[in-house]
C-alpha cells in the first residue's frame, strides 16, 4: 500500500476523492488540471487495480463505457503497524511525496484566475511549541477530535474543499535525562 499511495499524483487523486465523492476520470481531470490526462488515467488505473479506488457504477456514453470511481477509505490510509515498520528512509520518502503533492496543490490553487489567498484565509504558518509527552498526547487527541468529524463531510453547494496538512515532529533533540 505504501508503494501505491507513495506518488504525488496518486496522493492528489486520493485527496480529491475524499468526502464520499464518486467521480469519472474526466471529472478528476477537471479538478487536477496541471497533470496531463494520460498521466491521470494511468494513476487512476493503478489506484483502481490496487483496490484504493473502486468502480461505483458504469454507463455507456457515445459507445464507450464511462466509470465513476469512489475511494475505498479503508485502503487509502496506512495503519499504525505499517507506519511503525517504516525505516527512516521510508519516512523521508513519504514526507517528500506529501510535500510534493502539497506544493502541487498550492500552485494549482494560485494558478486559478480568482485565487485570493487573503480572502480565502490561506495559512501556512509554523509554530514552535514546547511540550511534555503528556502535553503532546493531549494535543494529538484534541486535534484528532477537532478534525475527525469534519472528514465525514460530503461535498455540498455551500462547501469548498480545503487541504489541511498538520505536520508535527520534534525540532530538537529532547534534553538528556538528568538522572
Image: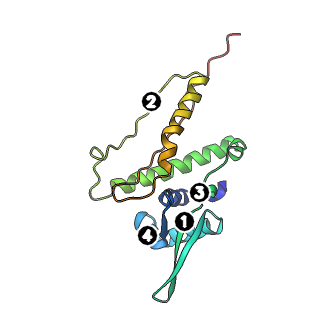
Q: Is residue 4 above or below residue 54?
A: above
- The residue carrying pointer 3 sits among few (fewer than 14), some (14 to 19) or many (20 or more) residues within 10 Å by Cα, namely some
Mark nearest the camera among 4 and 3 is 3
- How far apart are the two marked residues, 2 and 1, measured between alpha carbons? 36 Å
At 40% across and 36% down in the image, what residue appears? 125
Closer to the eye: label 4 or 2: 4
Q: Secondary structure at mark 3?
A: helix
What residue is shown at x 60% (from left), y 48% (from top)? 94
Which of discs 2 and 1 lies nearer the camera? The answer is: 1
Q: Which residue is mark 3?
A: 73
Tag 2 secondary structure: loop
Residue found 55% across the figure and 33% down from its top: 140
Q: Which residue is mark 1?
A: 70
Give me the C-alpha separation between circle 2 and circle 3.
Answer: 30 Å
Identify the residue position indicated by label 2 in the image.
Answer: 127
Estimate how packed mark 2 is, as few (under 14), some (14 to 19) or many (20 or more) residues with alpha carbons within 10 Å: few
First-in-chain label (4 vs 1): 4
Provide the residue designation for mark 4.
Answer: 27
Residue at mark 4 to residue at mark 2: CA–CA distance: 37 Å
Q: Earlier in the sequence, mark 2 or mark 3?
A: 3
Q: Secondary structure at mark 4?
A: helix
Q: Quadrant of residue 31?
A: bottom left
Q: x, y (%) of residue 60?
A: 50, 85
Residue ranking furthest to the top = 179
Kindly tell me whether residue 4 is visible in this rendering: yes
Amino acid at each position: 500500500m505504501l508503494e501505491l499511495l507513495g506518488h504525488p499524483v496518486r496522493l492528489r487523486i486520493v485527496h480529491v476523492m475524499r468526502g464520499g465523492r464518486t467521480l469519472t476520470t474526466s471529472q478528476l481531470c477537471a479538478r487536477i488540471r496541471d497533470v496531463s490526462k494520460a498521466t491521470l488515467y494511468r494513476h487512476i488505473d493503478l489506484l483502481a487495480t490496487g483496490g484504493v479506488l473502486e468502480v461505483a457504477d458504469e454507463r455507456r456514453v457515445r459507445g464507450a463505457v464511462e466509470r465513476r470511481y469512489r475511494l475505498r477509505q479503508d485502503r487509502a490510509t496506512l495503519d499504525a503497524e505499517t507506519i511503525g515498520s517504516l525505516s527512516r528512509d521510508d519516512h523521508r520518502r513519504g514526507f517528500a511525496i506529501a510535500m510534493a503533492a502539497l506544493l502541487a496543490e498550492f500552485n494549482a490553487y494560485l494558478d486559478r484566475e480568482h485565487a485570493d489567498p487573503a480572502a480565502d484565509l490561506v495559512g501556512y504558518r509554523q509554530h514552535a511549541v514546547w511540550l511534555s509527552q503528556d502535553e503532546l498526547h493531549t494535543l494529538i487527541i484534541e486535534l484528532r477530535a477537532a478534525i475527525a468529524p469534519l472528514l465525514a463531510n460530503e461535498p455540498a453547494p455551500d462547501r469548498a474543499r480545503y487541504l489541511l496538512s498538520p505536520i508535527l515532529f520534534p525540532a530538537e533533540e529532547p534534553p538528556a535525562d538528568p538522572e
